[in-house]
Image: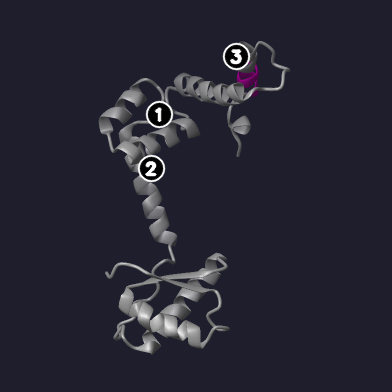
Amino acid sequence: MSLDDLLPSDLMRFLTLIISGDADLEKSEKTRCLVPSISQDICRAVTKGEWKLPKHTLLCTTIRHLYRSKQLTTILSRLGHCETYDFGLELETALTKALDEVSIFLGPQIILPFTEYSVIRELLKQSEEATMEVGQEYILNTFDLGGCMKALPLIWKFPEEYEKHVVTPGPSQ
């Protein structure tokens, strides 16, 4: 859904006329940025914050992630530029819970010695199945150095079987 579908078209035309001087002119880059921004501010003010619009939600989460400042987010929220800090936390928590519910990231736990080639082979197989399920082309695996030392010889020995596998070293858990 685009902003044109979210925001009242008469408001958009009115603001375009005010900012550019002519509603029929090809919009400049400045007008294309200002009109939706001001429209979202007006809609938020008129609905007393009932409408949760992209500008306010994204600015809230961006400020929270970049600066981790409740005070800055609160100031911007009081000025009408973004949602509240608490709303940002609620949104992030809801997104995290939703992702946890549908995530296939963690496969079944394998309780075998990590030093066995059969365990590495099983991990590579499960990664491939999970990757295929989400439609990715390449299978990415991160192992500690010991895991890489077992996985890479398998991949080199069976290049056709593991042609789409990418193994990278990473921190041990």
Which coloring applies here? one colour
Q: Which residue is mark 1?
A: 82
The amino acid at mark 1 is Cys
Q: Give the quadrant of residue 3.
A: top right
Q: Residue at x 65, y 18 (%)?
A: 13
Q: CA distance from mark 2 to mark 3?
A: 33 Å
33, above or below 148, in the image: above
What's the magenta region?
9-14
**Crowd rating for badge 1 (residues with CA inside 10 Å; few <14, some 14–19, many 20+):** many
Q: Percent position (x, y) of residue 30?
A: 58, 22
Left or right: residue 80 compared with residue 20: left
Secondary structure type for disc 1: loop
Sooner in the amino-acid sequence: mark 2 or mark 3: 3
Q: Percent position (x, y) of residue 26?
A: 71, 22
**Crowd rating for badge 2 (residues with CA inside 10 Å; few <14, some 14–19, many 20+):** some
Sooner in the amino-acid sequence: mark 1 or mark 3: 3
Sooner in the amino-acid sequence: mark 2 or mark 1: 1
Left or right: residue 81 compared with residue 85: right
Q: Nearer the viewer, residue 42 or 123?
A: 123
Q: Percent position (x, y) of residue 125?
A: 47, 80
**Quarter containing the N terminus:** top right
Residue 91's disc number:
2
Q: Which secondary structure class fits the magenta region best?
A: helix
Q: Which of the two discs, 1 and 3, sits closer to the camera?
A: 3
Secondary structure type for disc 3: helix
Q: Are marks 2 and 1 in contact (CB under 8 Å)?
A: no
Q: Give the quadrant of residue 8.
A: top right
Q: Which residue is mark 3?
A: 19
